Amino acid sequence: MQTPRPTRSVLYIPGSKDRALDKARGLPVDAIIFDLEDAVTPEAKVEARATLKAALEADGYGRKLKIIRINGLDTDWGKGDVEALRDAKCDAFLLPKVNGAADIDALAAMLPEGREIWAMMETPKGILHAEEIAAHPRVTGFVAGTNDLAKELNCRYRADRLPMQMALQMIMLAARAHGVTAIDGVYNQFKDQDGLRAECEQGRDMGFDGKTLIHPDQVAVTNECFAPSEAEIDLARRQIAAFEEVEKSGQGVAVVDGKIVENLHVETARKILALAEAVAQTSAE
């Protein structure tokens, strides 16, 4: 099985701030979203392109996924962002407020062939068209924009995110149907570690691959929550061993901790071990 690339922690960094761009090089995050949209004021947007391009040229970000969030193509800055950075040293471009596959087509036409595109899922239309967006051949990642989505839905904030559950699940269904990475939205109270942990655990249990972050203090908890635990790794190894032993003997049924182990459990177990190996490699670096 191919070793997956972890995306546990995905930190937003303003593309206009040299100090933040430099500090991000040493942070133990799996991915960085270099933001030219919400994190950059209108008067700084044009200059931010050159600042970000220079930082990406200098590199030093190691194995971190490097994702550029441009401004919307319907704004005064989106097309200029693409023109200035289309050949930048990054892994993907993140398009905000994607409503359908046509939005992805518009960006894809402006980028080099093969350049990956991630989609911000933060509008009602985008959620309703999640399947067609995920099916687009250039799309490899979804990011849940929960703040904008909550505003658009006019829903109340609740710790359990119950008003947003249907939208989050639709993101996950579309992502898993088409093999797209799915990243959960931000947790706004960056000093609340307990609340962050609870929301990370919820997102992880729903199936998200990681979580977007707004502050470096959120990295440690997020990396821990979205990595396989020692107990999960141990169980995965025992499930694989038991299943392989039964296959070898050709007799009986594999049982671990009083539960039958079938091929689907073994497949999940192997994914857990592959992710654990990838996380270990990332930590070592």
Image (cartoon, grey):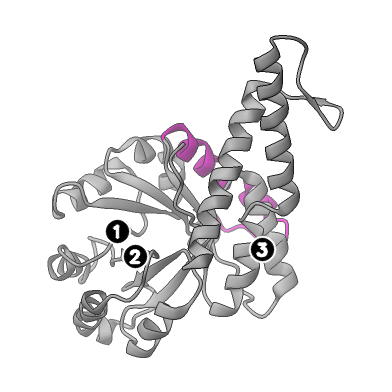
Instruction: From the top left corner, tell me how far across and down residue 14 is, in percent.
Output: 37, 79
Which amino acid type is marked by label 3?
Tyr
> Relative to residue 194, is residue 170 drawn left or right?
left
> Relative to residue 69, is residue 131 drawn left or right?
right
| Earlier sequence position, callout 2 versus callout 3 | 2
Dots 2, 3 in contact, CB < 8 A: no
Provide the secondary structure element on which disc 1 rests. loop
> Relative to residue 136, is residue 254 drawn left or right?
right
Provide the secondary structure element on which disc 2 rests. strand
The residue drawn where x is 35% and y is 71% is 34
Provide the secondary structure element on which disc 3 rests. loop
* Majority secondary structure of magenta residues: helix
Dots 1, 2 in contact, CB < 8 A: yes
Which amino acid type is marked by label 1?
Asp
Q: How far apart are marks 2 and 3 (CA)?
A: 30 Å
Q: How crowded is mark 3: few (under 14 residues within 10 Å), some or many (20 or more)?
A: few
In this rendering, the answer to whether 58 lies above or below 158 is below
Q: Which residues are drawn in magenta? A: 153-178
Which amino acid type is marked by label 2?
Lys
Instruction: From the top left corner, tell me how far across and down residue 269 is, in percent.
Output: 63, 36
Residue 184 visible to the viewer: no
Q: Report which residue position mark 1 lands on.
A: 91
The residue drawn where x is 33% and y is 59% is 94
